[in-house]
Structures are given as structure tokens and as C-alpha cells.
């Protein structure tokens, strides 16, 4: 690593990634190496600060250099936290838009998302899901609070086209076997989650 | 035929009831029998609901209109508004009763074609009420997630949310803390591993707080006076629409004098 780097330059890079992710509305791969480099920089800065304090123990006031180092430490830390916070809020938004279910996010086959997550983020999503499910149970008798809130329902029934096989689904009026290519008229509330997850399409 | 006229009358009636939540009209000719046998005739729940609510000097509202107002307020306010648990649970009960009634009538082979149409209308209405409830609950949940740390440190806010929401807030704050610790803080030197830094210079505080100075459109439901943070008072005439900072009308929103639009 070059020694001419300025304090906080890596932190700026990290924030730029979050920014790019927001602008393109995509989740970039977790940048483990950059996070590690910043953590290393933090340790170096800490050592430098301690050394400065020791060296200037007799001085009447702390040296100005200490202030700069402390600011850099605080800034880097905020950059790190901001980066992680941005990622988990992105994930949570995605989680809700997929009808509050984990499998589409974490299954190995839907390649894209899971490969971009750090192991801690996978853990986080699992516990988050648990927490949401506990809250949902409060309302389970009357309604499912995780269902879509994008469009108010206008009709009870909806004509759907099956895009992917999704097996036999229990509905209010019996069970239906959804096979790819079929069309059926079904109750919206029975299959809404399948539309959200991309198994069915509204015609 | 008189049947058609009657149907239309009942349809209109159920339409006018629709605002206060769906209701299935009693079956003509059978209701008397039901009453006699005390066989739980579908009660007119709307009336019951309104009786439960204390009378307001403000314009009369059905429970659903109240919920719609609170829903809009919640969606426009930067801060979390007081929970409406009594209203919400009475509406949830109503939804459940209506759904049960619908199930019962649908399964009854003597239900006529005309009644099936009415059942469908009632069902659609139930779905639409559910949508509002869902959106209302989720809006609050979203704010609670954003301000989880602020909420668990602030007892005044905790009085405004339900027990379930409070539990959710503390679970969520804990989750976030754990994630930060596992991903970042545990690798930092000990002196930097806290989450309660005092912000330097122009850095924002560590705990995100709702921005109560955000501007909102306040629609006065009756004549009232808003007081800004600087101590100025602003008269709001009934029906007037004013752009104010949220802090100036927070109390008025809570007591129903003002609604956000």
C-alpha cells in the first residue's frame, strides 16, 4: 500500500460504493477487502494517537496533530457504519418488496443476491425475518401485514398466467395445481405472494 | 319485480355503510326468524362500533374514516404518532366478524345468486379495509425501524406506541447493534468500539432522530391555533390548508384538530 495516501481516502471510496448502489438501485458485492483495509488504517491511527499522547505528556496542551488523527478515526468509523447500515436497509427494502420471505433472497439458486452478502448480513436477515414474523403473529387472525401495500385491491379475483411451476397451492375454494403456461382465475389474496415472488403474472 | 327494487335499496344501503366498513345486509324474510330463535342474527356492527367511540365535537366520523385519517397523518408525519390501538382492534374485530359471516353465508347452499353478489361486494370491501390497516401498520413499523435506538432511549416516545411495537423496536435496535458489532466494531481498537460517540464538528449525531421541523400540509378540521417553536402563534381557520413545520402542529394532530394531507 502506498504511504502517500491521505487519511480517510479509503472511507471515501466505501461511501462512493454506497452512493453508486443507491444511484443504480442495485446491491454491489460486499467489499470485504476495503472494509479490512479501513479497519487496519484505524488500528494504525490508534497507535499513532497513543504515541503522540505519550510523546507530549509534558506539553501544556495536546499537539494539533492529535486532533487531526482523532477526526480521521471518527470519520472512518462513521464511514464504516454508514456503509453497513446502507446495505442492511437496502436488503430490508428488498425483503419487504419480495413479500417478506427469505427464500428468494437466500436460496443458492437465485444466484445474484446471496453471493453479494457477507456472512454477517445473512445472519442479520435471518434474525430480522424472525423479528418480523413475531410481530406479524400479533395480527395473524385478521390479516397478513406482510402482503403487498403497493396497490389497493380493486377486484377480488385476478386472472393469472403461470410463469414457473409452483406446485399445488391451497386456496379458499380448494387446491389448485399451477403448471407453467396455465391460466386461471383465482382469488387475489390467495396467490398475491406468488405474484410478488414471480411465479405468476397478472394478465 | 319488487325483488329488484328491494335489492337496489339494500345495495344502496350497503354502499352507504361501506364507508364504515363492510356489512352484509340481513336476508329479507329470514331475519325475523333469526331474531326469534336468537340464533346470532348478524348484528349491525357499525352501530355498535360507533357507540363505543366517545362523541367528538369534531365532524362525525365512522371508524373507518378515523382510521383513514390516522393513516394519512402517519404517512405524512416525520415522527411516530400516538398509536390508535382501541380503534384498530375494534376494526380488526369487525373484519374478523365480517369474514366469519361471509364464510358462513358462502357455505350455505340456500344462499341465492343475488346474495352471492352482495357477498362479493362485502368481501371486496373487507379486502380494501385490510389494505388500509396493513399500510397503516407498515408505515409505523418503517418509522420504528428507522428510529429504533431513539425509541428505546426515549420514554416519552414509548408511551405513543403499542407493546408489540415496543418489543419490535427493542428487538430491532438489538439486531442492528449486533450487526454493527459483528461486522465492524469488534475489529476496531477497544477505544473505538462504542456506539455512543459524541459527534465531532459537523458530524450528525449517532442516533437518528425524527426531523420534527419538516414541513407538512396541515388541514384544520376546526378553528384552532398553532404555536411554532419560535413562540409565534398562527390562527388556523376551519377548512384552511397551511404549510407548517411538523413541530408546530404535532399536538393538534394528536388531538384531532388538524389532519395532515
Image (tube, coloured by chain):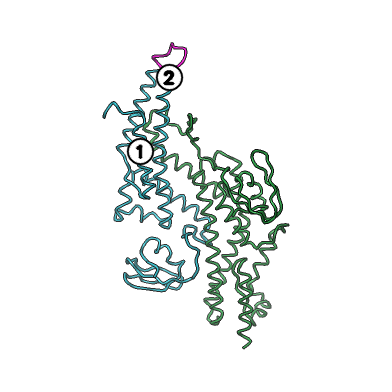
Chain colours: A cyan, B green
* The label number, if any, that marks residue A146 in the structure image: none
- Same chain for mark 2 and mark 1? The answer is yes
Please state the horizontal and vertical placement of residue B53, each as a whole percent of the image. 68, 59
Q: What is the secondary structure assignment of the residue under circle 2?
A: helix
* Quarter occupied by the N terminus of chain B: bottom right
Q: Is residue B214 magenta?
A: no
Q: Helix or strand or loop: what does disc 1 sit on?
A: helix
Subunit under mark 1: A
Q: Residues within 10 Å of mark 2 (few under 14, many from 20)?
A: few
| A169 in relation to A120, above or below | below
User: How far is disc 2 from disc 1 in space, using C-alphas?
Assistant: 27 Å
Residue A64 colored magenta? yes
Q: Quadrant of residue B7?
A: bottom right
Q: Residue at x 65, y 71 (%)?
A: B43
Q: What's the magenta region?
A: A53-66
Q: Earlier in the sequence, mark 2 or mark 1?
A: 1
Q: Nearer the viewer, residue B23 or A163?
A: A163
The subunit carrying tag 2 is: A
Query: Label 2: which residue?
Result: A64
Q: Which residue is mark 1?
A: A14
Q: Nearer the viewer, residue B9 or B233?
A: B233
Looking at the image, which residue is at 36% across and 53% down?
Answer: A105
The mark tally for this picture is: 2
Most extreme residue toward the bottom is B1
Q: Identify the residue at horizontal 57%, vertical 39% (top origin).
A: B154
- Residue extending farthest to the top is A58
Image position, residue A162 (x, y; %)? 35, 69
| A40 horizontally vs B177: left or right | left
Image quarter where the C terminus of chain B lies is bottom right
Q: With B137 as the anchor, is B178 left or right in this view?
A: left
Amino acid at each position: 500500500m502506498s504511504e502517500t495516501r491521505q487519511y480517510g481516502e479509503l472511507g471515501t471510496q466505501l461511501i462512493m460504493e454506497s452512493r453508486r448502489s443507491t444511484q443504480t438501485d442495485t446491491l454491489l458485492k460486499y467489499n470485504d477487502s476495503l472494509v479490512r483495509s479501513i479497519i487496519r488504517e484505524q488500528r494504525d491511527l490508534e497507535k499513532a494517537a497513543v504515541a503522540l499522547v505519550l510523546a507530549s505528556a509534558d506539553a501544556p496542551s495536546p499537539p494539533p496533530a492529535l486532533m487531526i488523527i482523532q477526526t480521521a478515526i471518527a470519520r472512518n468509523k462513521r464511514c464504516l457504519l454508514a456503509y453497513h447500515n446502507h446495505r442492511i436497509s437496502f436488503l430490508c427494502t428488498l425483503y419487504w418488496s419480495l413479500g417478506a420471505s427469505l427464500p428468494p433472497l437466500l436460496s443458492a439458486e437465485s444466484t445474484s443476491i446471496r453471493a453479494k452478502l457477507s456472512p454477517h448480513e445473512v445472519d442479520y436477515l435471518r434474525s430480522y425475518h424472525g423479528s418480523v414474523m413475531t410481530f406479524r403473529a400479533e395480527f395473524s387472525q385478521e390479516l397478513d401485514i406482510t402482503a403487498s401495500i403497493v396497490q389497493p385491491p380493486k377486484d377480488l379475483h385476478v386472472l393469472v398466467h403461470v410463469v414457473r411451476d409452483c406446485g399445488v397451492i391451497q386456496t379458499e375454494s380448494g387446491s389448485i395445481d399451477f403448471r407453467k403456461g396455465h391460466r386461471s382465475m383465482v382469488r387475489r389474496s390467495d396467490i398475491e405472494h406468488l405474484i410478488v415472488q414471480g411465479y405468476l403474472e397478472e394478465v | 319485480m319488487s325483488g329488484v327494487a328491494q335489492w337496489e335499496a339494500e345495495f344502496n344501503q350497503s354502499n352507504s355503510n361501506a364507508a364504515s366498513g363492510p356489512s352484509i345486509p340481513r336476508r329479507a324474510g329470514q331475519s325475523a326468524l333469526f331474531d326469534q330463535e336468537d340464533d346470532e342474527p348478524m348484528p349491525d356492527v357499525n352501530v355498535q362500533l360507533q357507540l363505543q367511540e366517545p362523541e367528538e365535537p369534531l365532524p362525525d366520523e365512522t371508524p373507518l374514516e378515523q382510521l383513514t385519517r390516522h393513516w394519512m397523518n402517519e404517512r405524512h408525519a416525520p415522527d411516530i404518532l400516538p398509536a390508535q390501538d382501541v380503534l384498530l382492534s375494534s376494526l380488526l374485530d369487525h373484519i374478523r366478524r365480517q369474514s366469519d359471516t361471509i364464510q358462513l353465508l358462502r357455505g350455505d347452499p340456500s344462499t341465492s345468486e343475488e346474495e352471492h353478489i352482495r357477498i362479493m361486494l362485502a368481501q371486496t370491501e373487507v379486502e380494501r379495509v385490510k389494505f388500509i390497516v396493513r399500510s397503516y401498520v407498515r408505515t409505523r413499523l418503517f418509522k420504528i425501524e428507522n428510529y429504533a435506538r431513539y425509541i428505546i432511549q426515549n420514554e416519552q416516545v414509548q408511551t405513543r406506541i403499542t407493546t408489540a411495537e415496543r418489543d419490535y423496536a427493542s428487538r430491532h435496535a438489538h439486531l442492528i447493534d449486533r450487526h454493527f458489532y459483528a461486522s465492524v466494531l469488534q475489529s476496531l481498537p477497544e477505544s473505538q468500539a462504542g456506539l455512543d460517540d459524541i459527534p465531532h464538528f459537523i458530524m450528525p449525531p449517532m442516533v437518528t432522530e425524527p426531523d420534527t421541523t419538516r414541513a407538512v400540509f396541515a388541514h384544520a378540521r376546526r378553528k384552532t391555533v398553532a404555536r411554532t417553536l419560535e413562540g409565534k402563534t398562527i390562527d388556523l381557520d376551519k377548512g384552511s390548508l397551511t404549510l407548517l413545520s411538523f413541530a408546530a402542529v404535532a399536538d393538534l394532530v394528536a388531538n384531532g384538530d388538524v389532519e395532515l394531507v
